[in-house]
């Protein structure tokens, strides 16, 4: 009986030791799981922080774009308002304002007519006043009509000369200089009015493209 009791005691100790061992093993595995969970939580927090930073940067970029677009629209409205005058058609586009003369400025070659000269001189004065508050770039586009025996496209010397003459009238009674204007020749097929025989006199002209510029760089 004593031997049986000892055997039972040994078995009990073994079971108790095994139970302790199992519990110890369980606690060791739990610590590893907690550590892994902590690391995963830190990674999620870091990824969330980066996502928030990216979202904030994108929102700032979109805000800047919206502000720039609003500023440009306001400048275009001001240009259209200040340059509206009889005999001139204002065509407002997304990025510029185009001034189109309702009648041809040049009766022939690069000889300007009196009405065109007067209108360009007045526009020059208004551009000078406008530039004091709204920075703009003015492109003078010379137009010509394709003639028999001449080049049907590609621009022409006549059109470029018309742009040069128009710039002289824009600058003569204002504080603007000839170098303030960009002079270009339009393709013969790209007149301000459809290329028909009836519109030929109207297409012997120039058009003006007024484009707002951004604020001057900070010194």
Image (cartoon, rainbow, N blue to C red):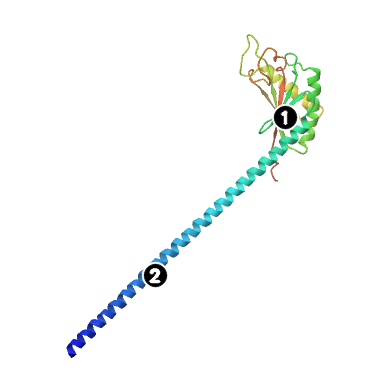
The residue furthest top is: 149
- What element does badge 2 sit on? helix
60 on left or right of 81? left
Q: Which residue is at a point 55% across and 51% down the rendered structure image?
A: 54
Q: Is residue 132 above or below residue 193?
A: below
Q: Quadrant of residue 212?
A: top right
Q: Residues within 10 Å of mark 1 (few under 14, many from 20)?
A: few
The foreground one among 33 and 110 is 33
Residue 125 x %, y %: 80, 30
Mark number, residue 213? none
Q: Assign a secondary structure to mark 1.
A: helix
In the picture shown, does residue 211 fall above or below 50? above
- Label 2 neighbourhood size at 10 Å, few (<14), some (14-19), many (20+)? few
The disc placed on residue 179 is 1
Whether residue 82 is visible: yes
Left or right: 25 as drawn, with respect to 125? left
Residue ID at (80%, 19%): 115
Judge whether residue 127 can be spotted in this image.
Answer: no
Q: Dividing the image into 4 quarters, which one contains the N terminus?
A: bottom left
Q: Nearer the viewer, mark 2 or mark 1?
A: 2
List x then y, in percent, for residue 209: 70, 28
Residue annotated with mark 2? 31
Q: Is residue 147 above or below residue 40?
A: above
């Amino acid at each position: 009986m004593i031997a049986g009791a000892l055997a039972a005691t040994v078995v009990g100790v073994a079971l108790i030791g095994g139970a302790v061992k199992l519990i110890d093993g369980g606690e060791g595995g739990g610590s590893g799981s907690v550590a892994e969970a902590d690391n995963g939580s830190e990674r999620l927090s870091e990824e969330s922080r980066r996502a928030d930073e990216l979202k904030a940067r994108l929102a700032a970029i979109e805000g800047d774009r919206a502000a720039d677009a609003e500023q440009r629209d306001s400048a275009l409205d001001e240009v259209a308002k200040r340059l509206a005058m009889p005999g001139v058609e204002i065509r407002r586009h997304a990025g510029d304002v185009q001034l189109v003369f309702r009648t041809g400025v040049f009766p022939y070659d690069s000889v300007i007519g009196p009405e065109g000269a007067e209108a360009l001189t007045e526009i020059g004065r208004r551009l000078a006043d406008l530039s004091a508050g709204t920075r703009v770039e003015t492109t003078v586009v010379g137009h010509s009509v394709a003639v028999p025996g001449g080049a049907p496209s590609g621009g022409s010397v006549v059109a470029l000369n018309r742009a040069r003459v128009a710039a002289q009238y824009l600058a003569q009674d204002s504080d603007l200089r000839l170098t303030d204007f960009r002079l270009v020749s339009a393709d013969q097929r790209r007149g301000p009015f459809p290329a028909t025989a009836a519109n030929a006199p109207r297409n012997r002209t120039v058009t003006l493209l007024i484009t707002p510029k951004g604020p001057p760089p900070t010194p």
